Image (spheres, rainbow, N blue to C red):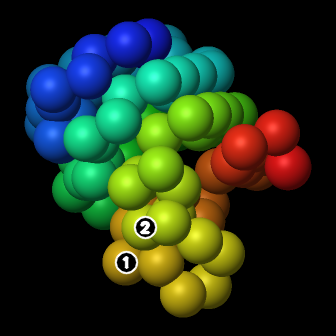
């Protein structure tokens, strides 16, 4: 998803995308929240999450310390700002 400048949270309905393998989130300036831990863990085929140019979400997804980290820590490949 890209350039949803006003969205603050990804919807819980994301959990319906059971075949999702890669989630690329780009240029969502106000995005702060991912769906719940249960929803994110239900995406069992999700292997990569890539967050780029989403300053608030990037901060909240910092390894080990960000409040959203527990929602993505199980994903094998986590890319935040190209790292």
Q: Position of residue 15 (x, y in %)?
A: 26, 30
Residue situated in front as seen by the camera: 83 or 15:
83
Q: Is residue 73 above or below residue 4?
A: below
Q: Quadrant of residue 6?
A: top left
Check disc 2 and report its element: helix, strand or loop.
helix
Give the residue at x 25% y 41%.
Answer: 30
| Left or right, residue 81 beside residue 73 | right
| Left or right, residue 26 beside residue 71 | right
Give the residue at x 69% y 48%.
Answer: 80
Q: CA distance from mark 1 to mark 2?
A: 5 Å
Q: Position of residue 46 (x, y in %)?
A: 58, 32
Give the residue at x 47% y 24%.
Answer: 27
> In the rendered image, which residue does mark 1 sit on?
67
| Left or right, residue 24 beside residue 6 | right
CB under 8 Å between callouts 1 and 2?
A: yes
Q: Position of residue 34 (x, y in %)?
A: 30, 48
Q: Is residue 47 visible?
A: no
> 10 Å neighbourhood of mark 1: few (<14), some, or many (≥20)?
some
Residue situated in front as seen by the camera: 54 or 16:
54
Q: Quadrant of residue 17?
A: top left
Q: Is residue 4 above or below residue 56?
A: above
Q: Is residue 29 visible?
A: yes
Give the residue at x 47% y 40%.
Answer: 54
> In the rendered image, which residue does mark 2 sit on?
60
């Amino acid at each position: 998803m890209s350039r949803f400048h006003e969205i603050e949270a990804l919807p819980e309905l994301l959990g319906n995308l059971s075949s999702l393998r890669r989630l690329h989130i780009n240029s969502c300036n106000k995005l702060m929240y991912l769906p719940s831990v249960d929803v994110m863990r239900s995406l069992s085929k999700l292997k990569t999450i890539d967050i780029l140019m989403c300053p608030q979400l990037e901060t909240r997804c910092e390894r080990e310390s960000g409040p959203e980290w527990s929602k993505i820590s199980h994903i094998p490949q986590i890319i935040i700002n190209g790292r």
